[in-house]
Image (spheres, rainbow, N blue to C red):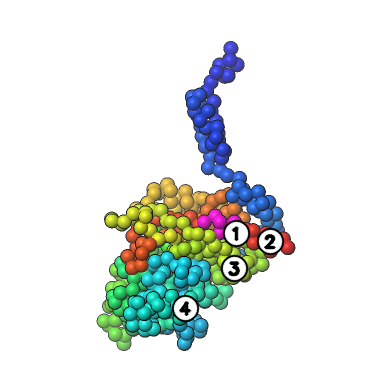
Amino acid sequence: MKKNNLLNQAPSVLNIGIDGFNGSVTAGGGTLTSLDWQPPGNADPELAWQLAQLMGDERIEAANAQACNRIINARPIWEDMALRADGVIPELKGSRLLLHAGPPVNWRDMCGPMHGAMVGAVLYEGWASSESEATQMLKSGQIDFAQCHDFNAVGPMTGIISASMPLIQVRNTSHANVAYCTLNEGIGKCLRFGANGAEVIARLKWFESVLAPILKAAVRHTEGGVDLKAIQSQALLMGDEVHSRNAASTALFFMQVAPALAAQPYLDSDHVRQTLDFIAKNSQFFLNFSMASCKAIMDAAHGIAFSTVVTATARNGTETGLRVSGMGREWFTAKSDLPKGLFFPGFKQEDACPDIGDSAITETAGFGGCSFAASPALTLLAGGTVIDAVRYSKEMYEITVTKNPALSLPALDFAGAPCGIDVRKVVDTGIRPVVTTGIAHKDAGVGQIGAGVVRVPMAAYSKALTAIATKFNS
């Protein structure tokens, strides 16, 4: 009798990846629990075989441990302001070269904001006297383009760097490498979003004449420079993830700069006031320092033979590209996804530009999406819930090599942030790295229209893994 009762009970089914039988289970009164799962290798047999050949390789394990050791032990110090980019990037001197965010892209394939920012940079440098003249110069090949990452630099959103722009200069004293980034323009109409009007150019000229020289005076008056990793680590304990939210890190930075300036009475007092006022009113001011810090950290982990750790994730508004420690300067690219999140009033998903900017360098160093659990307040801007923020960080543990004890996440019992995104683990699990990001309008000059999250395209990881398998097993 007991046996017959069991046979008559509706089934309880745990479904792993195949949904074709779901209807028959629920139609019969059964209960169904589906797991979000897919076979390794993105369900591609050849890719799965390449993956299997790389898993457990002692050469890779040792190389990845070395890469993560360099990340964990990095000490990025803000040591100076370069008052002109061509003073530290020689290729910009006397040339008509513009650096941009992301992997390589030509004029024809650039997104709207990138076009607008390129035009703005040409006007800013005085190479053209009108927008139409600048556009013609860009279209006709009179201006050269290259990616920031190839010049030890990074730039937010469009990421444009031209010869006259001041740059933040950061030295990783643990590895003796240097990284650069532009200064943060604030919100609204900015060059990084593709705006190029008179007010945008005027602000950039003010950076040259006032902001950069005052910041240079501040850092030069700070013995040993400013320890950016210390600010980033402390900010994680104060509600930032140090990519899309920088309220705490900007406040900590302000606390470093203000006393250094107050101690120098010979400085122009009005210029000091303007500088401090600009920083105080721009809660994202520290973002560019965070990016330069992370670039200095990750460049030290690059170039390790047999390492499968990602050392750069960069987007140009058309494609997203990866660089892998053991694969030299090669980019592995795929079409950028559209960020998902919350939009400012009057804007919607259809207005969004595909993912753009070098700022995902923060995720590669363990901040941003990896540390989303540290920033519950960011969910109010980017959408989702605090539970989602914690889940994102936990997911990133599944695709990273280790934890960084220097970056504590309070919501996860002060566990170290995920450290060292491993190409193999991404392809094995199907978990794509999550990036916290601002959302730009697809048209030039409109600016930021929201904030949210985006996933790095799996196709870029699949290409990287195939190239790794070919090189490492040859």
Q: Nearer the viewer, residue 301 or 120?
A: 120
Residue 461: in magenta span: yes
**Rendered residue at 60%/60% (across/down):** 464
Task: Identify which amino acid the numbered label 3 is placed on.
Answer: Glu
For the question of whether residue 45 can be seen, the reply is yes
Q: Earlier in the sequence, mark 4 or mark 3?
A: 4
Spatial CA distance of label 3 from label 2 is 14 Å
Task: Identify which amino acid the numbered label 4 is placed on.
Answer: Gly
Decide: few, some or many residues near mark 1? Use Cα within 10 Å; few <14, some 14-19, many ≥20.
some
Q: Earlier in the sequence, mark 2 or mark 4?
A: 4
Task: Identify which amino acid the numbered label 1 is placed on.
Answer: Lys
Q: Earlier in the sequence, mark 4 or mark 1?
A: 4
Instruction: Please give the label number shown on residue 470.
Output: 2
Give above or below for 309 relative to 134.
above
Could you tell me which secondary element the residue under label 4 belongs to?
loop
Could you tell me which secondary element the residue under label 2 belongs to?
helix
Dots 4, 1 in contact, CB < 8 A? no
Which residue is outermost to the top?
Answer: 1
The residue pinned by badge 3 equals 330
Which quadrant would residue 243 be assigned to in this image? bottom left
Residue 206: x and y, percent? 32, 80
Q: Earlier in the sequence, mark 3 or mark 2?
A: 3
The residue pinned by badge 1 equals 463
The residue pinned by badge 4 equals 141
